[in-house]
Amino acid sequence: MNKKISYILGLLVIIAGVGTNVFAGNTVAEKISAVTSAPPAQTEPVTKDQVQQPQVTPAATVPVQIHYTNPIVIVNKPSAFLNKKVDMVARFDKFATLGLDYKPAMRSSETYISFLIFRPDTDKNIPLSEMKLFIPRKSAEKLIDLKENDQVKISGTVFSNALGDVWIDVENLSKLNIGNKK
């Protein structure tokens, strides 16, 4: 039994790199070191002048990559998107008052209007009512020409998951094409 313990502890000592071989009857401390195959690449300290500064590209020239999310994914996991920015493409249904003036996720009907999009998981014109989309009335007035089935690009932030639904402050709503009437 002592042989097994000595063997296991010996392995631990080798793994740790330093140890005392007490169990084998030796009382001399042994230092185990790893031998490298080559000396270190840098032997002198680096001076400030030798450090290369990274090239900085102005923010205006860096392309912004937008990741569009399927609205159904957002609706299925509202908590996962809470306080996050979302971008999606959808078919516009209509402006509405759905969800306005609801205290737990308050958006006043005086300053906001909501709108509906169609469910992307069916060919039928079924509104995705589990997603509450709010846009300031002043922004919506500029989009009065939106018609049912118009493709729209939506960017916004999920601000609530009240009632298990997704509540989104829309920062940008833009029309992608002319409506495809079904």
Image (cartoon, rainbow, N blue to C red):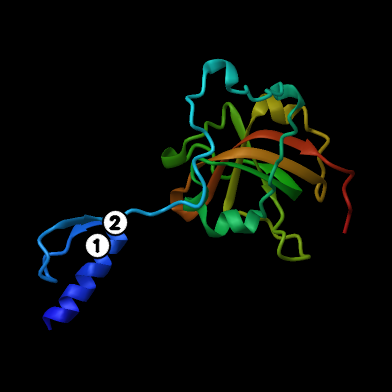
Residue 40, percent across and down? 49, 40
Residue of label 2: 32
Q: Residue at x 64, y 25 (%)?
A: 54
The quadrant of the rendering that contains the C terminus is bottom right
Tell me if residue 168 comes above or below residue 165 in the rendering. above
Q: Which of the 4 quarters of the picture holds residue 62? A: top right
Q: Which amino acid, mark 2?
A: Ile
Q: Which of the 4 quarters of the picture holds residue 86? A: top right
Q: 53 or 98, which lies in front?
A: 53
Mark 2 surroundings within 10 Å by alpha-carbon count, few (fewer than 14), some (14 through 19), many (20 or more): few
Name the outermost residue toward the bottom. 1
Mark 2 vs mark 1: in front = 2
Q: Are marks 2 and 1 in contact (CB under 8 Å)?
A: yes
Q: Which amino acid, mark 1?
A: Val
Residue 45, percent across and down? 47, 24
For label 1, the SS is helix
In the visual, does 28 lie left or right of 162? left
Q: 85 or 1, which lies in front?
A: 1
Residue 85, percent across and down? 58, 40
Mark 1 surroundings within 10 Å by alpha-carbon count, few (fewer than 14), some (14 through 19), many (20 or more): some
Residue of label 1: 13
For label 2, the SS is loop
In the visual, does 167 lie left or right of 60? left
Residue 165, numbered label: none
In the visual, does 146 lie left or right of 173? right
